[in-house]
Image: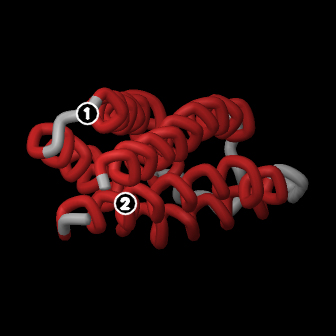
Amino acid sequence: MSALAVATVLVSGFVGGAEFASATLVHPVIRRLEPDAQLVMEKGLLRTFGRVMPVGMTAAAVLAGILAGREPSPLLVVAAVVLVVALVVTIAGNVPINIRTGRIREQQAPEGFLEMRRRWDVFQLIRGSLQLLGFVLVVCGTVGAA
């Protein structure tokens, strides 16, 4: 297995696992908190995930695209497309909501906060699922090529 394939598996696995776990394990627990506590949690996650995941998501899509170009197989091409679609969902759906959340200066969740975050949850489940699928396709494409 090439160094490129190993890097693609590792990065797409990290991103897919982290984002899918966020959607299915972390955020359902956050949703049980009072709205003001949800605001604190979301802003805290923006400071941590918000620094790492944009780089990771972009790297996963780019690496998968390069790998599909160098070692063409249907699985790797589909993996690259899926990871690019996940990135588009992130930029079009999650990022604007994250920006609005980050700009909240009050300590209390403002009116409309919960509805805004429920929209984010939908985008999160879509992108997390796509990123996990992209990882599975990368693994299958690289194992099949080995």
Picture layout, residue 25 above or below residue 126: below
> Which quadrant would residue 81 be assigned to in this image?
top left
Residue underneath mark 2: 9
Q: Say which element carries label 2.
A: helix
Asked if disc 1 and disc 2 are in contact, CB closer than 8 Å, the reply is no
Q: Say which element carries label 1.
A: loop
- Residue in front for this viewpoint, 115 or 110: 115
Quick one: label 1 or label 2, which is nearer the N terminus?
A: 2
- What residue sits 30% from the left and 38% below the top? 76
On-image quarter of the N terminus: bottom left
Across and down, in percent, residue 77 comes to 27, 31
- What residue sits 50% from the left and 46% below the top? 136
Q: Residues within 10 Å of mark 1 (few under 14, many from 20)?
A: some
Residue underneath mark 1: 73
- Residue in front for this viewpoint, 72 or 23: 72
Instruction: For marks 1 and 2, give the one nearer the viewer.
Output: 1
Q: CA distance from mark 1 to mark 2?
A: 15 Å
Going by the image, does 110 lie left or right of 62? right
Going by the image, does 21 lie left or right of 103? right
Across and down, in percent, residue 22 comes to 64, 56
> Which quadrant would residue 88 be assigned to in this image?
top left
Task: Indicate the amino acid at tag 2.
Answer: Val
On-image quarter of the C terminus: bottom left
Task: Indicate the amino acid at tag 1.
Answer: Ser
Going by the image, does 1 lie left or right of 124? left
- What residue sits 19% from the left and 39% below the top? 68
